[in-house]
Image (cartoon, helix red, strand yellow):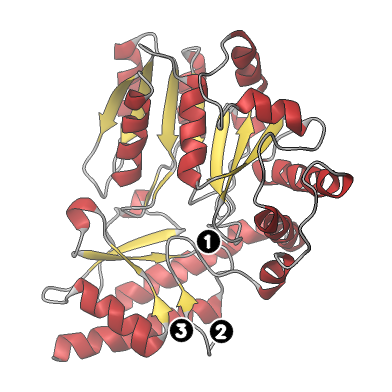
Amino acid sequence: MDKQKLIMLPGPTNVSDRVMKAMLNPIINHRGDAFRELYKGVLDRTRHLFQTEGEVVVLTSSGTGGVEAAVENLVRPGDAVIVPVFGEFSTRLAEAVEIAGGKAVRVSSDFGTAPTLDQLKAAMGAQGNFKAMFLVHNETSTGVAIPYVEEATRLARAHGAFAVIDAISSLGGYAIPVDKWGVDVCITGSQKCIAAPPGLALLSISDRVVEFLKKSPPKTRYFELPRYLEYGSRGETPFTPALPLYYALDEALKELLEEGFAKRVQRHDRMSEMLYGGLADLGLKAVAEKSVRSKTVLATYYPQGVDDAGFRKALAHDKDVVIAGGFGPFKGKVFRVGCMGQINEAYVRRTLKAIGETMASFRSS
């Protein structure tokens, strides 16, 4: 890794040589036996990731496509949907609900914090009847993670509503056992904690959602989940899959399971603590309050007078470490570091050293 750029973005992130080489497998007939065998393996390993015995789907799309698929399949015009809003991606989710004709009931908090479980409970009680709760687990724009996913899911189901979790930037660094917690749809992306290339969205789908979709088919074609389930039952996708990415995902999931899911989660715990501690030692302050800070995406304030674009350019050019800037109200004020996938002590030490040396040069100039 010393001779190439270290990608410490909140995604896409570093991919092993083994996974990259998997994309060199030959192009095959996606209606043939070879693909059926590949896809069956991918679906089986995806079930392990979600800790489910239920249905799973892999879409050739970004993570946002997976979120839109969940919205378009569950939300009908006029449906009320509870959406905690505490950053850029949760804002986008609420907007997606409204584009689908639903009523997004926002439970908002200042960016850098998260709505409390009591606020969510109060909003559900005040709303009464609502179709679903769509919850972003890990708000990539602010480095905030919701600590009460299980409790929020149980609240939604107690109201007879669907519980949908956007775990795009968290699943794999966190465990979200969807069957045990009763999550109806969980969404993640290939390019985050799974450590595969970008371009695939993975969804788990509960039996309740399957039954709902039989009675109320969605008005979408590419993201029509019943069609994916129908084709998936015979080892196919309804539309042409991104074959090289499926090979890569299969290999990345094998890596994850060889490491052990619990061990991967524990590694993310250790590496995030190391990163937070190292950044604090450099005198840098995290955006998120400690009780809700993410262990897969760290957002950190710049010291006064440090130019965002200049700092990140110098870090990438001089130190070969690539990080991200801020979103929305945090643009130019914070930088974000991904702590996911292949993250290890060598990556963390190199990142902290590069940030410290580059920051020192900006402070002295």
Q: Which residue corresponds to mark 2?
A: 1
Quadrant of the image containing the N terminus? bottom right
Residue at 67% across / 30% down in the picture?
Answer: 228
Q: Which mark is residue 269?
A: 1
- Distance between the Cα atoms at labels 3 and 1? 18 Å
Residue at 77% across / 64% down in the picture?
Answer: 25
Quadrant of the image containing the C terminus? bottom left
Which type of secondary structure does the marked residue at label 1 adopt?
helix
Q: Which residue corresponds to mark 3?
A: 350
Q: Nearer the viewer, residue 226 or 320?
A: 226
Residue 268 percent coordinates (x, y): 54, 62
Q: Amino acid at mark 2?
A: Met
Choose mark 3 or mark 1, whichever is in front. Answer: 3
Which type of secondary structure does the marked residue at label 3 adopt?
helix
Q: Amino acid at mark 3?
A: Arg
Q: Amino acid at mark 1?
A: Asp
- Distance between the Cα atoms at labels 2 and 3? 10 Å
Report crowding for label 1: few under 14, some 14 to 19, many 20 or more residues within 10 A (C-alpha): some
Q: Cβ–Cβ below 8 Å for labels 2 and 3?
A: yes
Residue 116 visible in this rendered orientation of the protein: no
Quarter location, residue 222: top right
Quarter location, residue 258: bottom right
Residue 327 visible in this rendered orientation of the protein: yes
Residue at 61% across / 60% down in the picture?
Answer: 196
Choose mark 2 or mark 3, whichever is in front. Answer: 2
Residue at 35% across / 86% down in the picture?
Answer: 317
Which type of secondary structure does the marked residue at label 2 adopt?
loop
